[in-house]
Image (cartoon, coloured by chain):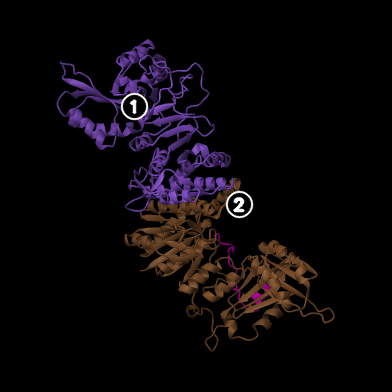
Chain colours: A purple, B brown
Amino acid sequence: MGIVVQKYGGSSVADATSIKRVAQRIVATKKAGHDVVVVVSAMGDTTDNLIDLANEVSPLPPGRELDMLLTAGERISMAVLAMAIGNLGMEARSFTGSQAGVITDSEHGRAKIIDVTPGRIQAALQEGAIAIVAGFQGVSQTTKDITTLGRGGSDTTAVALAAALDADVCEIYTDVDGIFTADPRIVPNARQIPRISYEEMLEMAANGAKILHLRCVEYARRNDMPIHVRSSFSDKIGTWVVKAEDVIPTGSTNEEGTMEQAIISGVAHDRSESKITVVGVPDKVGFAAAILQALADAQINIDMVVQNVSAAATALTDISFTLPRADGQTAMTALARLKDEVGYERLQYDDSVGKVSIVGAGMRSSPGITARFFQALADAGVNIEMISTSEIRISVIVMENQIDAAVHAAHAAFDLGTDEVEAVVYGGTGR
Amino acid sequence: MGIVVQKYGGSSVADATSIKRVAQRIVATKKAGHDVVVVVSAMGDTTDNLIDLANEVSPLPPGRELDMLLTAGERISMAVLAMAIGNLGMEARSFTGSQAGVITDSEHGRAKIIDVTPGRIQAALQEGAIAIVAGFQGVSQTTKDITTLGRGGSDTTAVALAAALDADVCEIYTDVDGIFTADPRIVPNARQIPRISYEEMLEMAANGAKILHLRCVEYARRNDMPIHVRSSFSDKIGTWVVKAEDVIPTGSTNEEGTMEQAIISGVAHDRSESKITVVGVPDKVGFAAAILQALADAQINIDMVVQNVSAAATALTDISFTLPRADGQTAMTALARLKDEVGYERLQYDDSVGKVSIVGAGMRSSPGITARFFQALADAGVNIEMISTSEIRISVIVMENQIDAAVHAAHAAFDLGTDEVEAVVYGGTGR
């Protein structure tokens, strides 16, 4: 049998007891005949505690040193996990990102993986050992300094290693059973999705589903590495994220052999959105571009943009766009500087909005999806503020206090639920 | 000006406040025009906490993984120290033992430094940065695994780096003002020694003085690297450990230009000794050798050995030797196995003994030192149990509850004290 890469997040290795439990799962996988490579995050609150310590000595710690500091977290968890496995009679060897061959660029705090050269991991496997690798970290190709990968870094490490090792699967262990058709905290009868395509998962992740980070899914898609998202607290099969042609229909099919349920795979929502409206922009060529350029210069990724038709009498228009709330202050400051140049009337900032999206590869070939979605929202009394679409996704901006109603309505409109209510809590992943 | 290597122990970097204070001292040294390399231990209790964590998952953690775990401690302290220096406007870069070029053998937990290749440290200095290096750790030349150096490891790292960098001095910062003529907790008027030779310091360290580890002094002696032992809590000049010809007399001299005070440099004591007596050994060739070989096979270093003259009537003799208390149980077990082979009567174990030593290069050329020492002990009512000597040291084993009296008597007999009482506490170093 081939190589299995398993990734355990911080909540799965929060303390000695959790680590011992994870060690048993790893040993069981090894005993089943697989070569096992484990990617591990820092234990529970370690990273937060280290950041607190850094802030005690420096308000703005240098990126190089912050990375050096934070990587101590995985160093601890990986060594302790290797010891726990050793105590079960199997040999495990821990490796830092650098030792595992995770080569990155030099962007401290958000480094990108540019190569993986896992020679030492392969040697350990050949000698019958289980390899434990620190997630979230690598070494800069140019400076040889230690780097961290930023958000989603440990998942991405796991997928990148799996790809470099030509593993059979990359298992991402988390505290939920898999990917659901909607957040079960909002929709109690949400159904676990057995298989989903990389493209759909990318849209889900980009639009608020927190189980997998966009970046790790994109890495898996590019390398065609199957991801199995599952719970570290049970032995249940979770959700497989695979290429589109491997998404096997599991529901009932109609006469043509296509699945009605597969038109929409899931409903994602995002509470981290905010909206800025630039009111009273002169409706002339170049002003909208100037506004968007100012935001780009401030490193702000905007999501949706809407420009209202101008009222003929005034020749003024409004430009609205959405962006992460975390960037709201920066964006408002950047725009305020443009006031004289552009000559707009005023800025409006609204952080009581949210985004609800339906995602499904089937909508490419199924007309009427938008109509059904919008009708469901209307029936639920949800007002649509902005709309954006991709080939396999329709997103709407709604008032924050209508997000739950919108998710419910969409989920019901496309018959995504089961009859039973799954007893799970839908949580976020660490890093 | 040249390179200064500074080593700060765990108590000097116990928390954020201490680290900020150390950062200021380092920056001051840099501003005085030196290139500065800092070797740092783990913060306060970090190492103990990590060992506790290891023991929660494994009663006997593999050495490789324990080293990986423990090196997280210095990783944290060095990064935070670098940040604190950065916050004072100077650039500092932290380096692991591996990055600093500390190459060791593969003996996990007690690795020996076999080479130092500090290319990255030199590059950092050339670019004007302060280099912060993790003490206590290196990388195995053969396996490329992370190693730790064991007791005295951080001091040894500092001296080894200083030697490899051809530094002007290796400053060892601790929580006392330097090396004293005796433990000031026992002898309140003990005097700080301004300069002491490597050889004398080796004898002091080997016989219980805890400020510098034997190993670090030996490394300095071999490489003729001056060590300056001083307090991280004051700016006082501490004790210089240098080659014998650089020990400048600072006291009054007699007509011949030699120093009477320099005959004896200091009094060391050691409370970690124990004594085993093998009673009733047949007085034949080879039995003593068999006993000592059994102890050597059990990896026990014995210190003094005494064989009593046998009583003619019985042709039996007693063999006594001293050894660290920590090895007492192992030694007794090893000897018990020999009972039938050697045919001794019984074993006696005594852990209420201690060793008191006087050390001084001057005793080579001064007759009567032993007599003066033993007379002083006799006058103080201290019974001598065993004796051993080197060219520059005389040690006696006494009852543990007479150690203080013996130290007092020796210190007074050789006029080592000052008139004032130094306000210091004589503590041990970490690692």
- Contact between marks 1 and 2 (CB within 8 A): the answer is no
Viewer-closest of A258 and B222: A258
Q: How crowded is mark 2: few (under 14 residues within 10 Å), some or many (20 or more)?
A: few
Q: What element carries label 2?
A: loop
Please tell me whether residue B137 belongs to the stretch shown in magenta.
no
How many numbered circles are shown? Answer: 2
Looking at the picture, how far across and down is residue B141, in whole percent?
Answer: 45, 61
Please give left or right for residue A367 compared with residue B303 in the image.
Answer: left
Tag nearer the camera, 1 or 2: 2
Give, as a three-letter code, the residue at label 1.
Ser
Q: Please tell me which residue is depicted at 50% across the width and 72% down the height of the picture.
A: B241
Q: Name the residue under label 2.
A: B60
Viewer-closest of B268 and A387: A387
Viewer-closest of B260 and B311: B311
Give, as a three-letter code, the residue at label 2.
Leu
Q: What element carries label 1?
A: strand
Q: How far apart are marks 1 and 2 (CA)?
A: 53 Å
Please give left or right for residue B13 compared with residue A366 in the image.
Answer: right
Say which quadrant the C terminus of chain A sits in: top left
* Residue A337 in view here: no
Looking at the picture, how far across and down is residue B313, in whole percent?
Answer: 85, 81
* Residue A302 in view here: yes
Magenta: main secondary structure equals: loop
Report the magenta residues as a range: B405-431
Q: Name the residue under label 1.
A: A274
For disc 2, the chain is: B
Q: In this view, does B252 lie above or below B293?
A: below
Query: Same chain for the residues at labels 1 and 2, yes or no?
Result: no
Looking at the picture, how far across and down is residue A39, in whole percent?
Answer: 46, 42
Viewer-closest of B338 and A176: B338
| Disc sitting over residue A39 in the figure | none
Looking at the picture, how far across and down is residue B106, in whole percent?
Answer: 50, 60
